[in-house]
Image (cartoon, grey):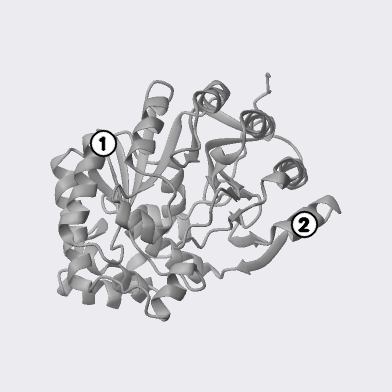
């Protein structure tokens, strides 16, 4: 399929999107910690969903748009069968034209990716796969309600490595019942696969999830703060020793293997979002589609928008949000000139007292041009970032 490249728009990327997110909600099982718009037992709706998804793209875009990054997430995109994946990639290529040198990422869960599906993705132009391993310990996987083990991760990597030039593993630390040596073991196994990108997230008990309910009923207990800090500290030390630089609070990569799509979010640039529960950010307006799959299908099929909450931020709110997101980037941080150009605000006039307070505590590093979290600051990042609001 040949698609003519649309003309470039004059608006900067923080106003008009150069990135797009596409959501596939289907899963084999809803994991206990998951708060994403995903559901199990709805595979029979997949073809209908793909039709609605294309209708949404056509209605929202009107004409093909050139983008630098595409991210297909879930749910489990690779829960779709090969024919459905081919249909999905064709519609994405029809409406979202990837610029030369662009990045196209697809999320996958171990056990859902076979050679046929991988070939469909690779032939379509997907060049990055994000594999959700989360843990290699049966005990932790059981708590997280993951339905795979180390063997399935190894099998998935055998499929991914020859077909995709870039791939990433996701891990979760702080799982109830785990100790520091358990996390060290997970890290060592992951690093033994020689990933060029590793995402390591501290477990969050999202309100309303099965794990959150287990916590509140006393079935599970979170690890204590000191242990969680030790796990995070170990993560930083071991990834650095393995040649993976921490470029964002929870993300580590070899040079050139950073997730370009996620860097869009952390710069507070604009992005398209399509599918049930998908968010978008255009010209300072943030909106989110309904998370209810039947409602999404009904509304799109009736020719109505599936949009739910809409939030239009003031110029100052956008500037403060931009500061928070940029500070998550542990290497880039906030460049004052770039911040002024994007927001129209001087960083020090906007947040001078906050900067000075946390700089005095050793949580921020400031060379006069660029502001970054210090090595100590990354451990209290949430506290620092909240103050910028």
List x then y, in percent, for residue 313: 57, 69
**Residue at the image position 17 percent from the left and 71 percent from the top:** 226
**Residue 307, label in figure:** none
274 to the left or right of 381 = right
Looking at the image, residue 83 lies above or below residue 307 = above
Q: Secondary structure at mark 2?
A: loop
**Residue at the image position 19 percent from the left and 62 percent from the top:** 179
Q: Quadrant of the C terminus?
A: bottom left
The answer, for residue 335, to whether it is visible in the render is no
Mark 2, Cα crowd under 10 Å, few <14 / some 14-19 / many 20+, is some
Looking at the image, residue 223 lies above or below residue 146 = below
List x then y, in percent, for residue 371: 26, 59
Contact (Cβ within 8 Å) of mark 2 with mark 1: no
| Mark sitting earlier along the chain (2/1) | 1
**Residue 254, label in figure:** 1
Locate residue 66: give its quadrant: top right
**Residue at the image position 41 percent from the left and 69 percent from the top:** 205
Q: Secondary structure at mark 1?
A: loop
The answer, for residue 99, to whether it is visible in the render is yes
Q: Nearer the viewer, residue 376 or 9?
A: 376
List x then y, in percent, for residue 68: 52, 36
**Residue at the image position 66 percent from the left and 50 percent from the top:** 275
**Residue 305, label in figure:** 2
């Amino acid at each position: 399929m040949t698609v003519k490249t649309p003309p470039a728009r004059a608006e900067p990327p923080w106003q008009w999107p150069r990135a797009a997110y596409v959501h596939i909600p289907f899963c084999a099982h809803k994991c206990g910690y998951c708060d994403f718009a995903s559901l199990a037992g709805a595979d029979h709706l997949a073809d209908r969903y793909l039709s609605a998804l294309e209708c949404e793209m056509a209605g929202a875009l009107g004409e093909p748009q050139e983008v630098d990054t595409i991210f297909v997430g879930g749910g489990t995109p690779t829960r779709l069968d090969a024919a459905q994946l081919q249909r999905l990639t064709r519609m994405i290529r029809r409406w979202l034209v990837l610029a030369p040198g662009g990045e196209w990422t697809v999320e996958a869960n171990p056990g859902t990716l076979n050679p046929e599906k991988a070939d469909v993705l690779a032939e379509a132009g997907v060049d990055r796969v994000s594999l959700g391993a989360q843990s290699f310990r049966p005990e932790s996987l059981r708590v997280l309600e993951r339905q795979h083990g180390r063997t399935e991760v190894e099998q998935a990597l055998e499929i991914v490595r020859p077909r995709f030039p870039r791939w990433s593993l996701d891990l979760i630390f702080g799982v109830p019942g785990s100790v520091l040596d358990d996390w060290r073991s997970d890290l060592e196994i992951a690093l033994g696969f020689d990933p060029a990108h590793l995402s390591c997230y501290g477990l969050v008990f999202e309100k309303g999830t099965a794990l959150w309910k287990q916590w509140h009923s006393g079935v599970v207990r979170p690890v204590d703060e000191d242990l969680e800090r030790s796990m995070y500290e170990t993560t930083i030390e071991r990834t650095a020793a393995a040649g993976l630089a921490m470029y964002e609070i929870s993300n580590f990569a070899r040079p050139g293997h950073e997730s370009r799509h996620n860097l869009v979010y952390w710069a507070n640039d604009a992005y398209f979002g399509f599918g049930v529960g998908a968010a978008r950010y255009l010209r300072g307006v943030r909106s989110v589609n309904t998370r209810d799959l039947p409602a999404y299908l009904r509304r799109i099929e009736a020719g109505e928008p599936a949009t739910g909450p809409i939030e239009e931020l003031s110029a100052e709110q956008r500037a403060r949000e931009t500061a928070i997101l940029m500070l998550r980037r542990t290497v880039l941080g906030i460049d004052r000139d770039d911040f002024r150009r994007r927001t129209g605000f001087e960083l020090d006039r906007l947040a001078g007292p906050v900067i000075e307070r946390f700089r005095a505590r050793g949580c921020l590093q400031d060379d006069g041009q660029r502001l970054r979290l210090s090595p100590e600051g990354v451990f209290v990042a949430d506290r620092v970032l909240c103050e910028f609001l």
